Each structure stands twice: as C-alpha cells, then as structure tokens.
Amino acid sequence: MFAARTQWNLASNRLAKLLEEVRARGGEVLDLTASNPTECGFQYDGASILKALITPAVLKYHPDARGLRPARQAVKDYYEQRGEQVAVENLILTTSTSEAYSFVFRLLCNPGDEVLVPTPSYPLFDFLADIQDVKLLRYPLIYDHGWQIDFHALESAITPRTRAVIVVHPNNPTGHFTKTEERSKLNQLCAAHDLAIIADEVFLDFPLNGKPCISFTQNHSVLSFTMSGISKISGLPQMKLAWLAVNGPDTQKTEALARLEVVADTFLSMNAAIQAAAPTFLAQRHGFQQQLMARVRNNLAELDKQLSEQKSCTRLEIEGGWYAVVRVPAMRSDEELALELLDEGVYVHPGHFYDFPGDGYLVVSLISKERAFSEGIEKLLAHF
Ligand SMILES: Cc1ncc(COP(=O)(O)O)c(C=O)c1O
C-alpha cells in the first residue's frame, strides 16, 4: 500500500519511551535538551506580535510565488543591518527551512541523486532526503581544538550523482562556523565538480564572540542556496517564516530562481498574516537574541565552572549556536548512558542522535532554564 520512501521504523526510541515513563511516574526531569525557545522563559513583546497579525492587509489575496515583496524587503533589511547585501529578487519565502531544503532538493536532484551532509550534524536531514528521494552521503568534520571540514574525505565522497554540499553555519550541535579558508576550498571543490552549496544559517546570529560571521548569501562564485528563518533568529518557530536566498554566477542563479518560482507557485504555502507581520517578527530578534545570548553565556560559564571541579568530563570548543558537546568516559554506549541519566532525572541527547563518530559524547542545550541546567549538569557529572 505504501511507498518505500516512507518505510521508517516508527516505534518510539528507548529514550523517548523512558521519558514518557519517568514523566508518568511523576518524576522531575531536568531537561537539558530544551530547544523550543517559546518554552524557555524568554520575554517576548506579545502585544506587538499580536498587533502585527491583525491588519486589513490579510483580508486580500495577492499571491506571489516568491513571497510578498514587503516581507522579502524585511529579509533584505535584516541582512543589510548585518552589513550584507541581498537583493529582494534573489529571495524566496518558505514556511520553514525544512520546506526550503525540500524546494532545493527538488530543484537539484533526480531520484537517487546525492547530497553531501556534514557529520556530526542535524538529524532531520535523513527524513528530508528520504521524502525527496535524495540519497545522503556523509562527509566527516574532524575535531582538533575546534571543528573543521575533512576536505580529503569530502572530495573522496563525491560521485557523478552528487549534486550539492550542505554546510550548517554554524553547525548544530558542534557550534562551529565555516571558516573563510574553508569557504574558498569549498568553492573550488564545488566549481570543479559542478556542485551547488546549500548553507543552513539558522544559528548565524548567535556567535559567542559577538562578532558577526559572514553569511553564504555573500558567496557568489558558485551557485549557493542560503536558508534561514525566524524560528531561531527571532525565537518564533510557531510563526513558520523562513527564506531561501539564491546567489552565484548570473546564468545559473537566474535559471535556479525561475525554476524555484514554479516549485513555490505549485504550493503557494505562505499565508498573508505571517507575511504582513514579517517586519515586526524580524524586529523582535534584537530583544530575543540579547536574552538568549545571556542565557547561553550563563549556562556555558556554569558548565565550565562545574567541569573545572572534576576530572572525568570535558567539553568541546564552541563558537556559536545553542548547544554544547560534553565529552564523557565512554564506558558504555551513549544511548545506555542517556538512559541511565534519564532514570536519574536528567534528560540529555546521546551523541549518536547527531552521528558522532563514537561513544562518549552527550549534547546539552545551552538555552535550558538556568536552574534546570545547573542542577542537571551537577547530576550528570556526579554520574562519573
Ligand atoms: C540546523 C538546523 N536547521 C534547521 C532547523 C529548523 O528550522 P525551521 O524551524 O526553520 O525548519 C533546525 C532546528 O533545530 C536546525 O537545528
């Protein structure tokens, strides 16, 4: 009855099952996996958000496959305020970065074509690829006092069916940015093999050193698709507003935009209210990002303080984003460890969720509420 592409193992994983059990027996769970900013105690300007949704503009239907121009202008302004030029003509609005991935996969890949993804990285790629009949090939990131792309492995993984390389800038959960030299090497490699770059920049505005990092929207030497959205930038995942910026050599860029417009026109998934509110939602980012970075810095300082008081665990270096990777003794699998910790009331993600190269990695969210974070880390470290 069903297509092979949806033949997933739908049983809940052991960690999800245990989480349900612990909660059902009324146990307190110190959640170090929190990633929903609307549940983390940040203050939003609720009145402005609601006001922006109620406007006469939403009573008219003016379909525009690329997204309504004033909303695209708000995205252009966002980049301009970062000191980066992006033309409204090169933007396509989507309901999420996941939808943007799906548009780009549709544009570039025939069934069975390949896209290179970094590992460790964001676990949703497998599903996004399955749904579009795209095959994922993995290229390793290597850790040596910071993360870097293993270019030798990346180049060796390319086959005649490879269409694009994904970079997550900064990556989730390793928290490292793609460096300028890496970008040049990536451009050379993609030009040589006729590949596009797909850059996921949902965490771009969260560098720990406070210095803005250059967006791939400024990458013009190869065809580049940069995606981002307000789910992270403004902490408003419920509003479903994201975008895709297309850059690169003129002929390829124009052709890509024309084809993407047809893909977008087929769905016309953007609704009027969210587009009308786009300037307000993007303006909300300043207050949100300030609170979020304060939380991240406090939690990171607390983590470092507690780590300095023991010898078994360390953390990997981070440059930005919302997560930290804790290196723990690999006495058993990450999954076993995460289950034991959950049984003791601390919920963390095992490294294998993100395809870490071995055991001994736990991922913690730095946006967790401070008390839960501090008590959770204390229990986590006491485990070893
Ligand atoms: C790297 C990365 N890309 C994209 C997303 C999802 O973004 P959106 O809500 O716009 O689909 C996430 C969410 O955690 C993410 O970590």
Image (tube, grey):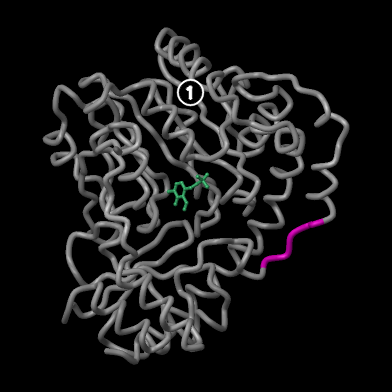
Which segment did they paint magenta? 42-46
Residue 260: say if magenta: no
Q: Is residue 138 left or right of residue 367?
A: left
Residue at position x 34%, y 32% in the image = 132
Q: Mark 1 — residue?
A: 246
Q: Is 80 on the left-hand or right-hand side of 243?
A: right
Residue at left offset 16%, top offset 81%: 331
Q: Which quadrant of the rendered structure holds the N terminus?
A: top left
Residue 153: tell me if it is visible: yes
Q: Residue 182, how many percent across, how many down? A: 30, 39
Residue furthest to the right: 56
- In which quadrant of the rendered view does residue 155 lie? top left
Q: In the image, residue 277 lies at what x, y percent?
A: 76, 39
Q: Is residue 361 above or below residue 251?
A: below
Residue farthest toward the top in the current orientation of the protein: 251
Query: Is 275 on the left-hand or right-hand side of 181?
Result: right
Dot 1 surroundings within 10 Å: few (below 14), some, or many (20 or more)?
many
Is residue 35 depicted above or below 228 in this figure? below
On whether ligand 1 comes within 8 Å of the CB at mark 1, the answer is: no
